[in-house]
Image (cartoon, helix red, strand yellow):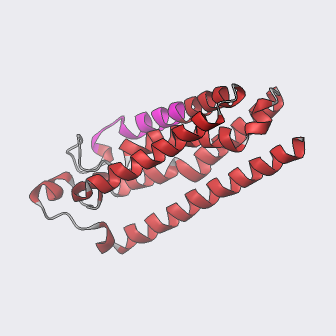
Amino acid sequence: MVQIDVPAAFAVGHFFADGAYKQLQSGSKESFYEVLIKHNFFQIFCFVWIPVYFMLEYFGWETTHMWWHRDSAADYAFFVPGFILIFFVAANLGFLFGTKLVRQGKLALNRGIWIGIIAASAVWILAQTKSTFRLGSYAEWKAGNAPWFYEDTTFLVMLIFVMVVWTGALAYFFVSLRKQGKALT
């Protein structure tokens, strides 16, 4: 859902700073750029394509049937490119802000930010299941006949697949960054 994808991208920036705190606290420019490249690799290959896929295939669900009342992202010429631009700005600002906090020794605050964003995202989804659990167009949703997400097998398979890819890749990068940090001491 676009309302949580951008904050989640920001949170992932903080998450990477958390995972690489030893490398970032060293002050090494090489370490900073290495982690920044890994962060952007994750955002490009393991994250941004997910909301774009759902935007193009399940526009009503991806926008939680709010603010955009047409049936397709194609109906809004700058929606997808604008989303991608905002997504990467947020993602990299999250990493830069997270790096700043880590370098200042504020690890708990940095961790609190990404955990808080993930928690707020869960609340966003669970607090309004009448729109977040429904697929279909805005018109179908407004008329009360939008299908439940679990009624569409393709959607359900893709949702499970992308969650496995996203969480698996996040776990891989976090463990990898921590191992790298341990090697510094």
Is residue 112 left or right of 103 when viewed as pictured?
A: left
Q: Residue at x 54, y 50 (%)?
A: 47
Reply above or below: 1 against 84.
Answer: below
* Bounds of the magenta segment: 75-90
- Relative horizontal placement of residue 137, taking residue 30 as reference (left or right): left
Q: Residue 160 location, x and y as percent? A: 47, 68
Q: In the rendered view, would you say 36 is above or below 150? A: above
Q: Residue at x 65, y 57 (%)?
A: 171
Query: Going 12% across and 61% down the picture, which residue do you hit?
Result: 144
Examine the image and state in which quarter residue 54 appears.
Answer: bottom left
Q: Position of residue 42 (x, y in %)?
A: 63, 47
Total marks shown come to 0
94 or 75: nearer the viewer: 94
Residue nearer the viewer, 80 or 26: 26
Where the C terminus falls, by quadrant? top right
Q: Is residue 29 magenta?
A: no
Question: Quick check: is 77 in the magenta stretch?
Answer: yes
Q: Position of residue 119 (x, y in %)?
A: 44, 48
Residue at 37% from the left image edge and 74% from the top image edge: 153
Q: Is residue 20 shown above or below 50?
A: above
